């Protein structure tokens, strides 16, 4: 895995471009989430303590808890020029995947992004914040796959990830998991990090085969999944084989590193 090169993905989109294009309908919503998670220099109120990171959460008069996060220093200046209450004096710089994983654990009511800036938006309420936390967990795996120089231990992240997706095809005789297409006739199990990558695969398979009956199922924990796959006669694995992210392949010899 360490020999993999970094690839351009939605994680590398400029944040404001991603927000604008998704809001116009020119990009799918997952592209914005990946851009948020891949942004390397979020400015966040808070401190790094010996016991861990302490986020600087604002409390409203009604008792609400709000986390203000900023994509750059200019966004912070715009906030402080307008807000009635200045930001927490501490400053942290965090990768998006790490920031939003912490935010999901911080019991906040709203995560506000670049407040008082023209492109401002927010995630609020239990459902949106839970989704943000799930995307943070997904991003830790996808970033390890697509930015290997920055994330040197992708195997641990892959084992710990609890929302791997598999695609099955069902007919009157039952259901079978679908292998990735391979022009060399190898048995390559198709794995997916997200619903959008699984659905891209299904759409292409339906077009190529003229068949329906394909479906995706998430919620597979990496440790159990890779232990199960290690007992099958596979030649390897292909992760996200048909987009929208670039495919990543693992030979059978590398699968042993996924069985901890």
Image (spheres, rainbow, N blue to C red):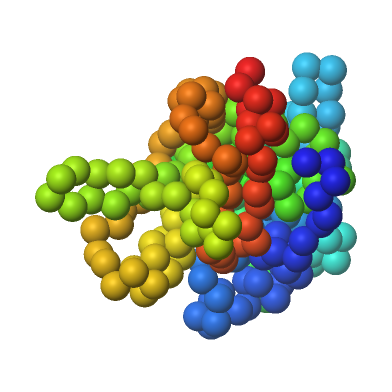
Regarding residue 210, the answer to whether it shows in the image is yes
Q: Is residue 60 left or right of residue 10?
A: left
Give coordinates of residue 14: x percent, y percent. Answer: 76, 69
Farthest residue in the front direction? 184
Judged left or right of residue 195, residue 53 is right
- Which quadrant is home to the N terminus? top right
User: Is 204 on the left or on the right of 64, as rendered?
Assistant: left
Residue found at the very far left of the displayed protein: 172
**Quadrant in the rendering for residue 243:** bottom right
Residue 155 position in % (x across, y down): 69, 32
The residue at 74%/29% (across/down) is 54
In this view, the residue in front, 57 or 4, is: 4
Give the residue drawn at x 55%, y 62%: 183
Q: Nearer the viewer, residue 136 or 253?
A: 253
111 w.r.t. 158: above or below: below
Above or below: residue 180 compared with residue 255: below
For the point 71% across and 47% down, the residue is 145
Q: In this orientation, does residue 107 appear?
A: no
Whole-percent x, y for residue 47 in the image? 83, 32
Q: Position of residue 5 (x, y in %)?
A: 83, 55
Q: Quadrant of the C terminus?
A: top right
Q: For the point 53% across and 26% down, which residue is it?
A: 230
Please say if 209 is above or below 228: below
Does residue 99 lie above or below 119 as drawn? above
Q: Count the marks: how many? A: 0
**Front residue of this view, candidates 61 and 25:** 25
Place residue 77 in its image quadrant: bottom right
**Which of the 4 image quarters holds residue 112?**
bottom right
């Amino acid at each position: 895995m360490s020999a993999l090169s970094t690839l351009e993905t939605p994680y590398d989109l400029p944040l404001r471009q991603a927000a604008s294009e998704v809001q116009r309908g020119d990009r799918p919503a997952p592209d914005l989430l990946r851009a948020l998670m891949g942004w390397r220099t979020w400015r966040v109120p808070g401190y790094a303590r010996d016991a861990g990171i302490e986020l600087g959460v604002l409390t409203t008069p009604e008792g609400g808890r709000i986390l203000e996060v900023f994509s750059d220093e200019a966004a912070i200046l715009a906030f402080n020029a307008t807000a009635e209450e200045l930001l927490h004096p501490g400053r942290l710089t965090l990768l998006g995947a790490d920031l939003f994983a912490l935010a999901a654990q911080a019991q906040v009511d709203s995560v506000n992004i670049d407040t008082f800036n023209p492109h401002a938006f927010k995630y609020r309420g239990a459902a949106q914040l839970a989704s943000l936390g799930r995307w943070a967990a997904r991003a830790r795996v996808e970033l390890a796959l697509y930015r290997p120089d920055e994330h040197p231990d992708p195997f641990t992240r892959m084992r710990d990830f609890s929302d791997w997706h598999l695609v099955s095809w069902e007919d009157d005789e039952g259901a079978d998991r679908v292998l990735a297409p391979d022009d060399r006739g190898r048995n390559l199990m198709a794995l997916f990090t997200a619903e959008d990558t699984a659905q891209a695969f299904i759409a292409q398979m339906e077009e190529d085969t003229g068949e329906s009956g394909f479906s995706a199922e998430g919620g597979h924990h990496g440790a159990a999944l890779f232990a199960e796959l290690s007992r099958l006669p596979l030649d390897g694995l292909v992760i996200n084989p048909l987009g929208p992210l670039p495919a990543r392949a693992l030979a059978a010899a590398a699968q042993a590193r996924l069985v901890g």
